[in-house]
Image: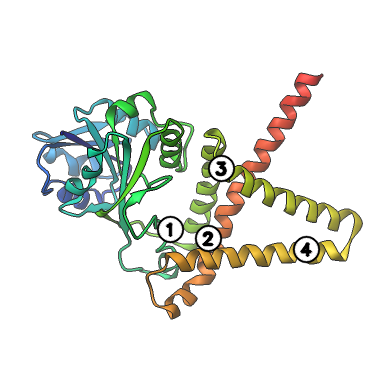
Amino acid sequence: MRVSVVVCTYNREQFILKCLDSLLIQSFKNYEIIIVDDGSTDRTQELLRPYQGGRVIIKRNPENKGLMFSRNLGASLSSGEIIAFTDSDCVTDNFWLEELVKPFSDDQVVIVGGRIIDPPAANYWEFASQDVNFISNTSGTVQAVIGCNMAVRKNFLMNNKFDEKFKYGADDLDLCLNCGRQGFKVYYHDKAVVTHFHRNTFRDVILQQYRYGFTNAYASIKNQDHKFFISYALWCILIAISYWGIKKYRIPDLRNAFCFFIVLYLASIAISSAKKQTHSFPNFVKALPGIIIRSTAHSWGKLSYSFLFLISVVSRKERRDS
């Protein structure tokens, strides 16, 4: 089995060589590395130039085209039966590829993902975001994996390319949901490990999580994920009814109901986050305010797209009726 590793990068001169060096010392031997420089304006291209040749292929976009375009381009240049993806600010474990390809022994497994480790936090928002990439503590089939540690069968990807409408993430969710809809398996393998060296500030976390929520909703609706429809349709209805009742009729009971929904929502975040934590209880308590804030940003992103989607459906129906 041959593997093509695709790494897309844009202005990551401080990380790209660490990523590439970790890929060059894999225990698995039958692989190539395809770096797609998406129009970087820093020293990325200059730093990469000495690595060109051998198992390393470097392709540069003349201008910034976006992650999905670059991933599709890298896949189109590949010669492997399996295409593995990681990000240019990740460092892979020496046995990453060897472990990542093992689940493909099952013909029904089309997508495989692995564990993503966070480096020591440099600030509070990195500390509060350390469970963002959590999938599971045990290997097995899952609904979705994360794109910075993911491998896909090439024949599936060539027929189900990354949707270039995704500008801010959730392309991995879209691909995984599409895989599941077609009756194939997505598998999480806990021993395939990468470390993700992204850095976060308060602004970065809020903006990133809102955008992820927005595009996650798009992916879920596009792929007819009924669990998403039920949960977020319910939230939309409850919030809309509560707000409308408070605004129009000034009903105290509805105000109390709205507060109850908010408390219930915050409790659900705390319980869900507690299940993912590997830290001590005091550290979890310390991180909880940040977890609630970033989770709320993510949820508002989902709600924003859900409302826009409902409005577009109503508008199309009105146009058809008129």
Q: Looking at the image, is mark 3 or mark 2 earlier in the sequence?
A: 3
Q: Are marks 1 and 2 in contact (CB under 8 Å)?
A: yes
Of the pair 211 and 41, the residue shown nearer to us: 211
Q: Nearer the viewer, mark 3 or mark 2?
A: 3
- Which amino acid type is shown beneath numbered disc 2? Arg
- Closest to the camera, between mark 2 and mark 4, is 4
Residue, disc 2: 294
Give the residue at mark 4: 257
What kind of colouring is applied to the model shown?
rainbow
Q: Earlier in the sequence, mark 1 or mark 2?
A: 1
N-terminal of the two: label 3 or label 1? Answer: 1
**Picture residue at 49% right of the left edge, 76% below the top:** 285
Q: Is there a contact, CB below 8 Å, between mark 3 and mark 2?
A: no
| Contact (Cβ within 8 Å) of mark 3 with mark 1 | no
Label at residue 217:
3
- Residue 217 position, x and y percent, is 56, 42
Residue 154 marker: none
Q: Nearer the viewer, mark 1 or mark 2?
A: 1
Q: Position of residue 298 (x, y in %)?
A: 55, 53
